[in-house]
């Protein structure tokens, strides 16, 4: 059934792969509308090669490629890392945190081009459809969203390949590696194919950013990372922009096989899904950030912030980056980071990033005069007796009751 007349111009989030190439042609055919392709450069490198040429050959009237690497690191990754946000204790949210920025830029193009619709290539089973569309509606509550995977009858890879062949779409119909991947400055993720068997080990040829830990250098490498107000600003004394700093840590971590994670996660839509991730720079960054926090952050502030991290991480994972609750929580987190100034020393060795030193000349709360095991004159150890008895009072009363009943 033709959808002619329902849409005049649509901006498509376009990667140049099989799915979005077919979607581009499908939008032209089914909606008989103008399609503007758009790709966000978040650090995926050569994957963006020939994107404009592919898009125009497939029917796009224009193609925008936006370099968003610095904005991605500065305004999305770094705020998330101030919270040490890790979903379900293991996932660094590399795909999740990219979606709100991709959507933001897509909506800016739609407004500039006078488009009345936007489209994406997310399936009806995954999290990305939620992340994209909640963000779209944040910027324009009346925007029309076209999600082809929820509309068309192309339900298999074979059907997609047949459609591509029929319409002469210039994309490969076979892949050397059959799993799907998503890459940006923070990570690369893998799903599908052999990973759909949760017992099967991910093949070594899958990994892109990291060497096999067993093949990493036999000599440890030490890296110093400096922080200001919770954000990393320098590596080994060299001040770097957020994107360049993250790229540098990726290089260091990848060389030492750091940041591989294989997990089964709980999708927002209700199913479990297996993903394999490489996050070399992010793994080092999180370890270093916690180290500087440990010497500069008040205990109760840290515990309060940490109690909110699972919820904060779920907000990002589920697509609520632009929600008022995330913004309020971010304000609390950012306030907690004002004293997180200092540097951490991290040892990189065969798949592990381990803190071995931390220092803060301006905001350290560590006082060796109080903490020392040697003789001191600033702490009366006898004071601990009353402290312990007061904290044990409720348990002493309960014990007295038990004794009275026996």
Image (cartoon, rainbow, N blue to C red):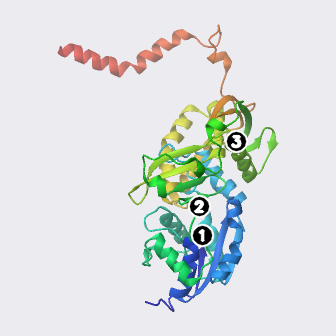
For the residues labelled 1 and 3, the Cα–Cα distance comes to: 29 Å
The picture places residue 189, in percent across and down from the top left corner, at 56, 54
Between 257 and 36, the one nearer to me in the picture: 257
- As displayed, is residue 133 above or below residue 378? below
Pick whichever of labels 3 and 2 is earlier in the sequence: 2
Can the viewer see residue 334 in this picture?
Answer: no
Pick whichever of labels 1 and 2 is earlier in the sequence: 1
Residue designated by label 3: 255
- As displayed, is residue 273 above or below residue 145? above
Residue designated by label 2: 176
Q: Of circles 3 and 2, which is in front?
A: 2
Query: For the residue labelled by badge 2, is the local secondary structure a helix, a strand or a loop?
Result: loop
Q: Is residue 96 left or right of residue 273?
A: right
Q: Of circles 1 and 2, which is in front?
A: 2
Q: Residues within 10 Å of mark 2 (few under 14, many from 20)?
A: few
Residue designated by label 1: 17
For the residues labelled 1 and 2, the Cα–Cα distance comes to: 14 Å
Query: For the residue labelled by badge 3, is the local secondary structure a helix, a strand or a loop?
Result: helix
Between 88 and 364, the one nearer to me in the picture: 88
In which image quadrant can residue 239 be found?
top right
The picture places residue 231, in percent across and down from the top left corner, at 69, 45
Q: Is residue 268 left or right of residue 98?
A: left
In which image quadrant can residue 8 be found?
bottom right
Q: Residues within 10 Å of mark 1 (few under 14, many from 20)?
A: some
- As displayed, is residue 405 above or below residue 334? above
- State the residue at coordinates (44%, 71%): 156
Query: For the residue labelled by badge 1, is the local secondary structure a helix, a strand or a loop?
Result: loop
- State the residue at coordinates (53%, 41%): 305
In which image quadrant can residue 366 be found?
top right
């Amino acid at each position: 059934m033709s959808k002619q007349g329902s849409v005049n111009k649509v901006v498509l989030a376009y990667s140049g792969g099989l799915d979005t190439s077919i979607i581009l042609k499908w939008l032209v055919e089914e909606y008989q509308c103008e399609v503007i392709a758009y790709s966000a450069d978040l650090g995926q490198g050569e994957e963006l090669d020939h994107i404009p040429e592919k898009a125009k050959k497939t029917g796009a009237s224009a193609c925008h490629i936006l370099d968003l690497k610095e904005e991605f690191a500065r305004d999305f990754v770094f705020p998330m890392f101030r919270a040490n946000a890790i979903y379900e204790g293991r996932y660094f949210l590399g795909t999740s945190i990219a979606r709100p920025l991709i959507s933001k830029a897509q909506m800016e193009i739609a407004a500039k081009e006078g488009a009345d619709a936007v489209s994406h290539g997310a399936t009806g089973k995954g999290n990305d459809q939620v992340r994209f569309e909640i963000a779209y509606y944040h910027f324009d509550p009346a925007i029309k969203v076209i999600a082809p995977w929820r509309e068309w009858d192309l339900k298999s890879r074979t059907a997609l390949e047949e459609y591509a062949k029929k319409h002469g779409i210039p994309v490969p119909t076979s892949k050397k590696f059959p799993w799907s991947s998503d890459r940006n400055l923070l990570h690369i993720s893998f799903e599908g194919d052999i990973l759909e068997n949760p017992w099967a080990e991910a093949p070594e040829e899958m990994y892109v950013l990291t060497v096999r830990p067993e093949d990493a250098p036999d000599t440890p490498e030490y890296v110093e990372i400096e922080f200001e107000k919770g954000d990393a600003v320098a590596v080994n004394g060299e001040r770097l922009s957020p994107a360049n700093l993250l790229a540098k840590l990726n290089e260091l971590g990848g060389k030492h096989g750091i940041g591989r994670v294989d997990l089964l996660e709980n999708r927002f839509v209700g199913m479990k899904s297996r993903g394999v991730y490489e996050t070399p720079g992010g793994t080092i960054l999180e370890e270093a950030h916690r180290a500087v926090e440990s010497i500069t952050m008040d205990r109760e502030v840290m515990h309060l912030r940490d109690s909110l991290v699972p919820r904060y991480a779920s907000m990002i994972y589920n697509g609520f980056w632009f929600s008022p609750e995330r913004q309020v929580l971010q304000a609390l987190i950012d306030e907690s980071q004002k004293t997180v100034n200092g540097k951490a020393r991290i040892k990189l060795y065969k798949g592990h990033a381990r803190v071995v030193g931390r220092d803060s000349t301006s905001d350290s709360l560590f006082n060796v005069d109080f903490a020392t095991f040697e003789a001191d004159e600033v702490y009366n150890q006898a004071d601990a007796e009353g402290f312990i008895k007061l904290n044990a009072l409720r348990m002493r009363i309960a014990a007295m009751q038990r004794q009275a009943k026996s």
